[in-house]
DNA sequence: TTGACATTTGAATAATTATTCAATTATAAT
DNA sequence: ATTATAATTGAATAATTATTCAAATGTCAA
């Protein structure tokens, strides 16, 4: 790492105390990382409209059941989806209310550009 | 790809026509991908509070100027930051108003968990 | 209890991407 | 013109991650 000298100490100090701590930013970027994949985002948007089993999602996205299952696991770990088993099938649904709001705010952002 | 048969055709059809088209979802996931990196997110949050030059950001994040510059380029391409040159320095600022709103909605999401 | 079905799992591969390093461009001062 | 400073660039490396493939788990029906 080359030695770095800031040119506007006042601004740096001001910003340093204004931004969230590193752990918060990390949590937030981890959250965006989850949304930053088209497969996972498609799954989330699908689940906004109906509870679906894994085979339905795989069919919808034209992907293997395995690939979908792996992504569902990420979404589960991130607490964005929940599941229930009924017989042989496992049904997934959104596990979060504000995710809807976030997705619509974000869509607006994209569309306004 | 193993042959996949959906189990709830009605749900699949309902969802198919309800979700945004693939290009829209791709644009949105590209957008989240940009936010899904702690370095870039730190830069954006810093720029919410002050215009900063590259050296300031590098100092703030304790990173090389080069690494920061590369990330600034991504943010520029994504139209999230703008820049102006003044003398030898280049100053970066947010190039988007709703990004603030999005970041605060998202922070709420994280904090409410 | 055997077989079929639905899904998960883990390891391997393929693809993507953040950071480093060295070289280059742009600006200003001497 | 030369030197110093500020930042960008491109190629290489390192690290992360999505998907595939084969095998395993759990459930139900015959």
Image (cartoon, coloured by chain):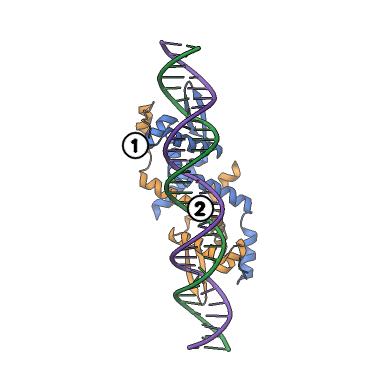
Chain colours: A orange, B blue, C purple, D green
Estimate the x, y position of residue B2 in percent, counting from the top left.
Answer: 61, 68
SS of the residue at dot 1?
Answer: helix
* Total numbered labels: 2
- Check the image and report above or below for C25 versus B40: above
Residue at x 43% of width, y 60% of height: A77
Quadrant of image for the C terminus of chain A? top right
Q: Do the residues labelled 2 and 1 touch (CB within 8 Å)?
A: no
Estimate the x, y position of residue B33 in percent, counting from the top left.
Answer: 51, 47
Q: Nearer the viewer, residue B56 or B107?
A: B56
Q: Nearer the viewer, residue A31 or B69?
A: B69
Q: Quadrant of residue A68?
A: bottom right
Q: Is residue B53 left or right of residue B9?
A: left
SS of the residue at dot 2?
Answer: helix
Estimate the x, y position of residue C13 in percent, counting from the top left.
Answer: 53, 58
Specify whether disc 2 shares its chain with disc 1: yes
| Residue placed under numbered mark 1 in the picture | A17
Query: Any mark on residue A92, and which?
Result: none
Estimate the x, y position of residue B86 in percent, counting from the top left.
Answer: 48, 22
- Real-space CA distance between mark 2 and mark 1, rounded to the nearest whole angstrom: 28 Å
- Mark 2 packing: few (<14 Cα in 10 Å), some, or many (20+)? many
Q: Is residue B29 left or right of residue A18?
A: right
| Residue placed under numbered mark 2 in the picture | A35
Q: Is residue C23 left or right of residue B19?
A: left
Residue at x 44% of width, y 48% of height: A29
Question: Which chain is indicated by disc 2?
Answer: A
């Amino acid at each position: 790492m080359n030695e770095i000298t800031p040119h506007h100490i006042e601004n740096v100090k001001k910003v340093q105390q204004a931004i969230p701590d590193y752990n918060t930013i990390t949590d937030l970027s981890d959250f965006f990382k989850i949304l930053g994949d088209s497969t996972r985002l498609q799954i989330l948007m699908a689940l906004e409209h109906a509870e679906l089993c894994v085979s339905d999602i795989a069919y919808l996205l034209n992907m293997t059941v395995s690939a979908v299952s792996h992504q569902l696991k990420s979404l589960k770990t991130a607490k964005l989806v929940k599941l229930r088993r009924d017989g042989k099938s496992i049904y997934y649904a959104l596990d979060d209310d504000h995710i809807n709001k976030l997705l619509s705010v974000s869509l607006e952002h994209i569309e306004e550009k």
